[in-house]
Image (cartoon, rainbow, N blue to C red):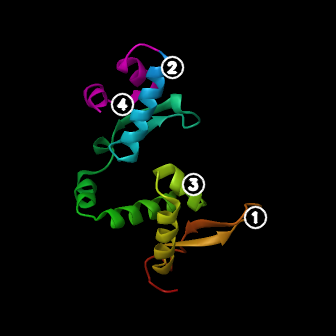
Amino acid sequence: MDILDRRGPLMTREVRLAFGARSRENTRRVKSVLVNLQTRFLITTAGGDTAGWSHHRWDLVERWVPPRSLMTAKTLSREQARAQIMEGFVYNMIVTTPADVAWVFGWQRSEVESLVSELREQNRIDTAWVGELEGEVLVPAAPEDRGSGRG
């Protein structure tokens, strides 16, 4: 975080070089640190190509999220924060799965399933069958239902 704080948005390779000499061990260490900081919502991708890790540009979350939103986030319980994160993720992904949510955020599958049930009851997300995809997927709730509490 200190590197990003001092030097601004950096590509993955620039972070890796700032961290030390190029080596497999250094690459593993940098990736582990980036994953840890990203899952704690301290850093975010800030451009680049999302096709591969080495093409990401990284920066501090505080430079990309409005201060008012960060202050509001600090008042949320862990459960409230997870619900908002998952709802936003489903809304932005359009179609995703509980397994994807668990993988992206490093959450337990059982926690995700519980959260899916809660958010469905609140009409904040929905499930659907989509074409050739196997099983139910998560989708945004219909605009007229979002947050209405109707089942």
Which mark identifies residue 131? 1
Give the amino acid type for the residue marked by disc 3 in the picture: Asp
Q: Residue at x 73, y 60 (%)?
A: 133
| Dot 2 or dot 1, earlier in sequence | 2
What secondary structure is the stretch in magenta mostly built from?
helix
Q: Quadrant of residue 88?
A: bottom left
At which x and y percent is residue 125? 51, 71
Q: Which residues are the magenta region?
A: 1-22
Residue 117 magenta-highlighted: no
Of labels 1 and 3, the one closer to you: 3
The residue where tag 4 is placed is 9
Q: CA distance from mark 4 to mark 1?
A: 39 Å
Dot 3 or dot 4: first in sequence order is: 4
Amino acid at circle 1: Gly
Camera sees residue 94: no
Q: Amino acid at mark 2?
A: Arg
In the image, residue 103 sits, relative to residue 132, either above or below, namely above
Q: Nearer the viewer, residue 49 or 18?
A: 18
**Where is residue 2 shown, x and y percent of the image?**
26, 29
Name the residue type under label 4.
Pro
**Circle 2 sits on which residue?**
24
Q: Nearer the viewer, mark 2 or mark 4?
A: 2
Q: Are marks 1 and 3 in contact (CB under 8 Å)?
A: no
Residue 75 drawn at (x, y percent): 23, 63
Residue 100 is marked as: 3
Q: Report if residue 11 lies within the magenta region.
A: yes
Distance (Cα) linking label 2 and label 4: 23 Å
- The answer to whether any part of residue 116 appears in the image is yes
In what quadrant of the picture does the N terminus appear? top left
- Measure how far apart labels 3 and 4 are at the Cα level: 27 Å
